[in-house]
Every structure is written in structure tokens, then in C-alpha cells.
Amino acid sequence: MATPLRVAACHAAPVFLSAKKTTDKAISLINRAAGNNAHLVVFPETFIPAFPIWSAVRLPTENHDLFKRMALESIYADGEEMRAIREVARKNRVIVSLGFSEKVRHSSACLYNSNVIINSDGQVLVHHRKLVATFYEKLTWSHGDGYGLRVCDTPVGKIGNLICGENTNPLARYSLIAQGEQVHISSWPAIWPTRAPDSSQSGSTGAPNYDNAAANRIRAAAHCFEAKCFGVVCAGHLGADAIETVAEGSLYSEAITKTLQSTSRAATLFLNPTGTQIRGFTVDPATGTKTPTDFLQQEEDILYADMNLEDCIEGKQYHDVVGGYQRLDVFDLKVNRSRRVPVKFVSDLEGQDLPDFPPIQSDGEP
């Protein structure tokens, strides 16, 4: 019998728009999870420094300062914050999946919705940028690429991740299934408002708001059933500091606060290879007491579950969608995993000896 994999899913809020303080909080949570014998520690979508929920509820003309703060507080994939996370993973001998808003050196404001999986040696195994920013996220993030559509083979299992709406993309999901994925991480924001609480404000005819918990669970369950893998649904928590910051300074501050407070919260939970939700547990930091818990939604905490990855085998007899239940002679999927860059410089003198120019004299003449 294989040793169970213990997963710790952090249902947590960032210190809103503070990369340093949120990094410190992530390190604290990793240390806490490692102390409870977790092998894999998972964080929500763009945990560092925040999820740009303001784009859902504020006028775009009001958001320039918030976007500027987001650009300044986003982090480099090889920056000091990431080095600190890698070091704590190495020190604790745990695997970490971390969502972050990524900035790049070729632009002052090109951002990506990114996720890394770091192994227990502190090495980055997967660096994924969300393929398509969803709906209002396009006001913050650029399109990613296929470079990160990878499953990492670790001593405790084959682990993959998709970010939020990517779990609705069947081709992205299939590309991970085809790499033998045994544990699928889906990371999510704390809320996803689509309508104001007063339907008359949105001109609707009474259609309900988006049910975050149900929608995320359905998508993750479908993937687990098709992949015959375990699922980790890790959502963020909406902190009071986020609500205050997003509402502050808007012409519609009161309505924004009401929308943020009333929109359904996303949940953190676990699924088995049949897509059925499984019960996890929380651990009291003071006493070490374990409390059986189905999901986390309203309060910050860490949800744990033990997974026997041999349970991924049986369902493959029925529907192995990358094996015996697939028609490889009919369907042909090609995935481009090259990292996209804005420009490639090629010199027409490349490979040739350059002339030996004499130094410029002080009078400007050679």
C-alpha cells in the first residue's frame, strides 16, 4: 500500500496589495502546514499580492491607481519573494503550489496571472501563465502561453495545476491528463461577482449571481472524473482590507461594498478520482486537535486531506481518455509549449568577425 499524500490547502486572504507582507504570511502558512506533516501546500489564485476584484465592480476610469499598485506589488518569477518561498519549501522538504501576479522585465506594466509548483528541493518544476485572462481580468493580465502546461513527477505523485477558468478549457485539461496527472490543483479567487445584489442596478430580469462554490466544484469534479485523479480546489478568502480598499474613493462606494459583501464566496475542498467530494480536516494550531471538515468558505484556515494515489487506478479500466478509451487515430492534439517573448533580436553580423573600431578621441574624431 502506498504512503498517503497529505495535502494542505490554504484558504487564505493576502495582505491586500502588499507583496512583502503576503509573502511573510505565505511562509508562515507553509511552516504551519509542514508542522502538520503536509507533503504538498497549495495557495489560491494570485495569492501574492491580490486578485484584481476591483475590475468587476468599479468603473475602469476609477481603477488607474489600483492598477498601478498592482503593477508595483506584483512579483518577478525569480525575484526576492519567490526566492524566500523556495527557501522555506526546501527547508521544510515540502512541495508548494503558489499563485501570484507576475511582472516581467521587458515592460513596466505587462502582468501575468501565474502559478509555480516548487519541489521539496526548492526548485521550480512548473512555471505556468494563465492562457487567457477571464472576462474583466483582461484589464489587468496579458495572455500567457503553453509553456507551463506540464505535470511534475514528484516522489509523492504526479501533480498538475490550472488556474480558475482554465478548468473550463477541455484541451488544457486533456493536455495534463495525457501526462499521467494524479493530483489536479485548481486555484480560484475568493469571489466572482457577475451581478449587483439589486438586479435593477444591472438591468437584469432577476437572474441569480454566480454561485462560486457550485461552479468551481462542478468543473473540478468533471476533471477528476475524466482524469481519474484527486482534486484540490483551493480558493482565496476575501479580507476586510480588500473590501475597504476596493470601495474606497469610488463614486459608488456603498454599492461596491454591498456587492463584495453579498457575493457568494468560493470554497476550498477536496475531490476523489470519481469526482466525489471527500472530507478533509483542520488542525487547531494551539492544541493540535483535528476537526473533520467538508470545506472552508467563510473563515481563513488550512484544510488537510490524505490521499492514496493508488485509488487513481480503478477508474482507468472504465474510461481511460488518454488510453483505451481514446481514438488516437481519429483525434490529434498538438500543444505548443514554447515560451512567448515580445521580440527576438538577430544580427546580420552574427557569427562574423566584427571590425576593430579604434576608440573615439576627445574631439569626436577617430
Image (cartoon, rainbow, N blue to C red):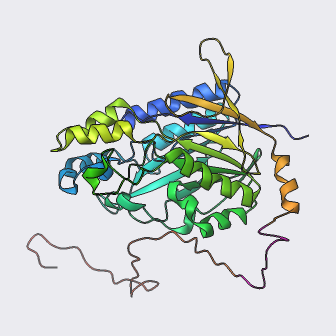
Q: Quadrant of the C terminus?
A: bottom left
Residue 70 in view (yes/no): yes
User: Would you place residue 358 above or below residue 39 in this image?
Assistant: below
Q: Is residue 324 magenta?
A: yes
Horizontally, residue 320 falls left or right of residue 205, namely right
- Counting every numbered tag in the picture gives 0
Residue 210 covered by magenta stretch:
no
Residue displayed at 28% across by 54% down: 202
Q: Which quadrant holds residue 151?
A: bottom right
Coordinates of residue 100 in the picture (x, y in percent)? 45, 47
Quarter where residue 174 is shown: bottom right
* Residue at horizontal 46 percent and vertical 36 percent from the top: 237
Residue depicted at x 56% and y 35%:
10
Q: Residue 78, image x and y in percent?
A: 47, 50
The residue most toward the top is 287
Q: Which residues are magenta?
A: 321-331
* Residue 255 higher or lower than 15, as above or below: below
In the image, taking residue 262 as reference, residue 162 lies left or right, namely: right
Q: Up-down: is 13 above or below 130?
A: above
Query: Is residue 246 shown to the viewer in this render?
Result: no
Q: Quadrant of the N terminus?
A: top right
Q: Is residue 298 left or right of residue 5?
A: left
Residue extending furthest right? 1
Magenta: main secondary structure equals loop
Which residue reaches farthest left? Answer: 363
Q: Position of residue 242 (x, y in %)?
A: 33, 36
Horizontal side of residue 255 vs 94, given as left or right: left
- Residue farthest along the front direction in this orientation: 205
In percent of width and height, residue 316 lies at 84, 60
